[in-house]
Image (cartoon, rainbow, N blue to C red):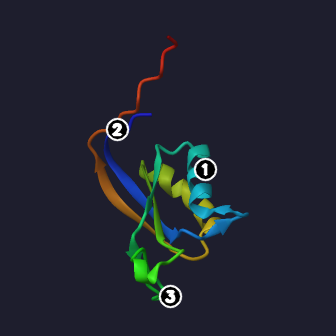
Amino acid sequence: MKIEGPAVRLTIFVGEDDVWHHKPLYHEIVHRAHVAGLAGASVLRGIEGFGASSRIHTTRLLSLSEDLPVAVIIVDQQDRVRAFLPQLDELVTEGLVIIDPVEVIRYVGRPPKTAP
């Protein structure tokens, strides 16, 4: 798949402890994005944050939290990302979902491995 030029970035903020059918929610989001044929997804673990509940989650030693913020980031063409949004309606019951316009400068995968 080749992406270049205008695109959108879909960012889903959830908690590290959020689950979907006994599996991490971020894992299910990435799995569904892959099945949907989106260009790619990355999961980033935050070291500190708070959301709608105003409860601070942090990795600081004296106030260790088990539910750190997690961001799932997906970049693809706008129509493909918008077609994926109904899946998030089903999955994300707490969190934040945002879409930003971006410009893709370079998107290159690894070449396939060849047999020795």
Q: Where in the figure is residue 3, as x and y percent of width and height?
A: 37, 39
Query: 41 and 55: which one is in front?
Result: 55
Q: Residue furthest bottom?
A: 54
Q: How many marks?
A: 3
State left or right for residue 107 relative to residue 98: left
Residue identifier under label 1: 31
Identity, as a three-letter code, of the amino acid under mark 1: His
At 48% from the left and 85% from the top, the residue drawn is 52
Q: Is residue 69 visible?
A: yes
Query: 71 and 78: which one is in front?
Result: 71
Q: CA distance from mark 2 to mark 3?
A: 37 Å
Q: CA distance from mark 1 to mark 3?
A: 27 Å
Earlier sequence position, callout 1 versus callout 3: 1
Residue identifier under label 3: 53
Q: Where in the figure is residue 69, as x and y percent of width and height?
A: 46, 71
- The quarter in which the N terminus is drawn is top left
Q: Where in the figure is residue 16, as x and y percent of width and height?
A: 54, 68
Q: Where in the figure is residue 48, as x and y percent of width and height?
A: 39, 75
Residue identifier under label 2: 107
CB under 8 Å between discs 1 and 3 = no
Q: Is residue 50 visible?
A: no
Crowd band around label 1 with a 10 angstrom C-alpha radius: few (<14), some (14–19), many (20+): few
- In the image, residue 19 sits, relative to residue 64, either above or below, namely above
| Secondary structure at numbered mark 3 | loop
At 59% from the left and 56% from the top, the residue drawn is 27
| Secondary structure at numbered mark 1 | helix
| Secondary structure at numbered mark 2 | loop
Crowd band around label 3 with a 10 angstrom C-alpha radius: few (<14), some (14–19), many (20+): few
Badge nearest the viewer, 2 or 3: 3
Q: CA distance from mark 1 to mark 2?
A: 20 Å
At 41% from the left and 77% from the top, the residue drawn is 61
